[in-house]
Image (cartoon, coloured by chain):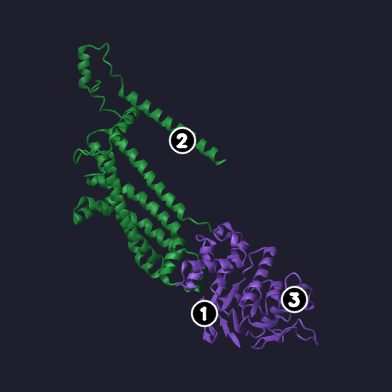
Amino acid sequence: MTFLQIDNLSKRYAPHLPPVFENVNFTIDRGEFVCIVGHSGCGKTTILNVLAGLESATSGYAYMDGREIHGPSLDRGVVFQSHALMPWLSVRRNVAFAVRSRWPEWKRAQVDAHVERFVAMVGLAHAIDKKPSELSGGMKQRVGIARAFAIQPKMLLLDEPFGALDALTRGTIQDELLAIVHATHQTVFMITHDVDEAILLADKVLLMSNGPHARVAEIVRNTMSRDRVRATVHHDPQYYRIRNHLVDFLVNRSKLIQAGTTDRVGDRPVIVEPGLVPGDEPLVRPHAEAA
Amino acid sequence: MPSSLNVRAGAVSLLILLAIIGIWHLATVSVKGDTSTAGMTAEQIEYQKMMGKDAASTKTTGFPTPMDIGGAIVRQLSDPFYDHGPNDKGIALQLAFSLGRVALGFCIAMLVAIPLGFLIGMSPLFRKALDPFIQVLKPISPLAWMPLALYTIKDSSISGIFVIFICSVWPMLINTAFGVAAVRRDWLNVAKTLEVKPLRRAFQVILPAAAPTIVTGMRISMGIAWLVIVAAEMLVGGTGIGYFVWNEWNNLSLTNVIFAVLLIGVFGMLLDLLFARFQKWVTYVE
């Protein structure tokens, strides 16, 4: 049962310029975690902005839950690349701002309880009354995540949320994000440059070729177990098969596809499962049906 | 170490002040000249009186010495609230009148400038449309507005307030427009994705974001308002510190004029400090 459907999306910034991307097609099921990977300039952020309702595509359609996406909505929470916290508000008030936007009729105590729950979920209960300027980059990004989760959206959109963080902090927050997503069964669409991150977090990885004329060339199904943990995931034999496939794509094939010199130039992206070798049974069917 | 720097700066300030007073004292005492009558013939004393160089008349000629000013300060501040009639009021009462006019004119200017500034900041159409009017009205001197104000409004006090309004509205207007237009895209996007209604967005996102710039505009406007009130009161008269200066000038009491000038400076500084405090309160670190 598709939750999100993208049909032949394309974006052209000016009539005389080539399209940044075209014929982008993919679907996302409820409860799925989808990552999109590709070089800079292939239009990943633009696709995310179209999904968020902040930009509109030149042609094509985006449907969520049966309805066309027309503008920004509380049903689609966004975590921006630069945390976008309001610097004059404390952590508590930043998250409360979002909570009040979603449920304006709630009383103060109710809002406070809700805020505290989500701030604790990202491990920042001790810093809840600090201003953003008193927090580190990782903490600020965590607050952004807490804010997005607090409105309990139908879908979460993350625009390279960990791009500005150092590798150690990134690792810790990835674990936390994975835990929260599994606990809340949140549907997530995330942009990332980090291949390891994509393999750890995502059920599906969309591979985009280079722009202009970029397209979703492949959809890689993550056939590893769903209770993978960052500390041990790289021991799984499937890990490096998938990883090599992704790196191979980014280094070689994304350019070739753009230049039109490979065999995969169809309209619909190909679905591959590089983790499996012939004869393997996949450990878990991609994304178990919820309830 | 900040406290050591403050102490040293304070010491240097004090030295400069003493140097200024010292030079002033030397300059004014020597100008007064020697007024003793010892060893003079009767004719010479008579001649001295005629030339206005005797002890009695030199009190009102020549630039006041620091001692004279000190005396004036003590005299005026010992009874600042006296009221002996329309032309003779204590210094605190005069200041109160001036401050009252400034407060009123400034508040009206604020009520006009900030909403209009919001409109201009958020709408490129209105910004372009209103720009010529703003650019033409902005450079007009307050004193040039006085005749128009007096003719139409007729009341001198209200004219003064109008002139304060028309001159202090521009910095606030322009700064508000700039601050509102320069609100970071990110925060506006957050408001969009949270489906924040326009009024809530204006008060809870745009206003706090633009507040430092707006308060800077208010601070500049207040400085201009204080300048203008003194000039306006000099012209129109009645009550107020500007009128006091003009009145004492007409009485040739330079001592009181200098004293009033010092007070104008001190109060201008206090008003600015007030707004500096306010500015600190709304400032945020990005």
For the colour purple, the matching chain is A
Residue at disc 2, secondary structure: helix
> Mark 1 Cα within 10 Å, few/some/many (few <14, many 20+)?
many
| Position in image of residue A58 (x %, y %) | 53, 82
Q: Give the percent coordinates (x, y) of residue A42.
A: 62, 76
Image disc number at residue B13 = 2
Tag nearer the camera, 3 or 1: 3
The x, y position of residue B158, in whole percent, is 23, 53
Residue with the most extreme front position: A109
The amino acid pointed to by label 2 is Ser
Image vertical order of residue B73 relative to residue B33, above or below: below
To which residue does mark 3 refer? A243
Sequence-wise, the earlier of marks 3 and 1 is 1
Vertical order, B18 against A5 (above or below) = above
Q: Residue at x 51, y 36 (%)?
A: B7
Residue at mark 2 to residue at mark 3: CA–CA distance? 69 Å
Q: Which residue is mark 1?
A: A56
Q: Quadrant of the N terminus of chain A?
A: bottom right
Instruction: Give the left or right position of residue B221, taking residue B59 as reference.
Output: right
Chain letter matching colour green: B
